[in-house]
Image: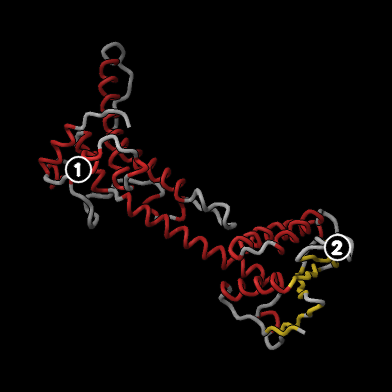
Amino acid sequence: MGFIDIEFVRQQYARLNEPLLKPLMDKGEETQQDIGVQEQFECELVEFTGHLCLYEKTRRDINSFISDLNKVDWEKAFQKFVRSWIRKRLDAGFADYNNETHLEASIDRLPGRYSNYRFPDEYDPGAPSTRLLFHKERHQLAPEELMIYTLKAFDPEALEQAIEKAKTTIKQEAYQQAAESLVDFFKISWYYGREDKIKLQNQKGRIILCGELWGREDRRGEQLDALLAKIGTYAVESGSTGLLSCMEEARSIQGYEAVPSRTPVNLGNDVHAVFYKEKLKFHLDEDEFASLWGFITTYYDGRLRELEIK
């Protein structure tokens, strides 16, 4: 971070007797990687305020020659700073997530106040009062006062907690959706059989499980695409990739026309399959089947049919 004169910050905080920027003052040029998110936010906010004040001074100087440069809207500028911070922290928080499930991590997953951040209404419970802090309305605040107000109005650590909660929630939702899609594809819920058991065959150490292909042949690629995304989620969570590899090859075979019956898929691997007119017949080794069944029973919240393997 470049040099910034923060004497006005010290003066304001001394006057308010609230030294929230003391960590910044003590740490000097310490790298942001070594400080917490609250301190990072404070550092960047101070730097932003300094640059913004310099910009406004420069604008006034330029306006002595021309007069069509817009004056800074201080309140909007500080709100935009917070929005930019939210987006940056969101991107950093979700950077290691987006390939884990079929669901996208976006700002819409956070509480609504973060999607287009605005300073809270003065009368909102818990909102800082500019009248009490500065004896002014918010639109009358100087930039250094708005900086202090921003620190009181926005909690960067609460944002981090919201991002972590969203990641956990998205994963759980994705796993549940994947389990539901697999149950529907293999028709193994109580809805499809009620009193009937799922009677599966074990042929030479491979469990036979059939998935339904529905609708017109030229739309089956779309069905497999949707299912493939959910199987990808299952593969990441379970660490078992046999079903995913098999389904990827099945999708490469399924075009806009019917696949000839008895077309083999992924032969010689842990999971292989055979196309039939309205189904895919999977042959899963026992480890892959155990992984699949464990995933389904963990994340499917409906009632499954009783399993019987012969």
Q: Which residue is mark 2?
A: 264
Q: Return the x and y of residue 295 as percentages of the image width and height.
A: 61, 71
Q: Residues within 10 Å of mark 2 (few under 14, many from 20)?
A: some
Left or right side of 71 for 215: right
User: Of residues 123 and 9, which is closer to you in this image?
Assistant: 9
Element on which disc 2 rests: strand
Mark 2 → mark 1, Cα distance in angstroms = 69 Å
Query: For this rendering, which residue is in front, 128 or 39?
Result: 39
Q: Which numbered marker is on residue 135?
A: none
The residue carrying pointer 1 sits among few (fewer than 14), some (14 to 19) or many (20 or more) residues within 10 Å by Cα, namely few
- In the image, residue 91 above or below residue 63: below
Image spot of residue 248 (x, y percent): 74, 57
- Residue sitting at x 28%, y 49%: 120
276 is higher (above) or lower (below) than 251: below
Residue type, numbered disc 2: Pro
Q: From the image, state whether disc 2 or disc 1 is nearer to you.
A: 1
Query: Outermost residue toward the top?
Result: 65
Residue at 80% in and 66% down: 273
Q: Quadrant of the C terminus?
A: bottom right
Which x, y percent locates residue 103? 56, 57
User: Which element carries disc 1, helix, strand or loop?
Assistant: helix
Residue at x 39%, y 56% (from the top left corner): 162
Give the residue pinned by disc 1: 22
* Res. 288 image quadrant: bottom right
Whichever of labels 2 and 1 marks the residue nearer the N terminus, that label is 1
State the quadrant of the N terminus: top left
Q: How is the image coloured?
A: secondary structure
Specify the quadrant of the image occupied by residue 291.
bottom right
Name the side, left or right, on which 140 lies relative to 111.
left
Residue at 76% across, 74% down: 209
Q: Amino acid at mark 1?
A: Lys
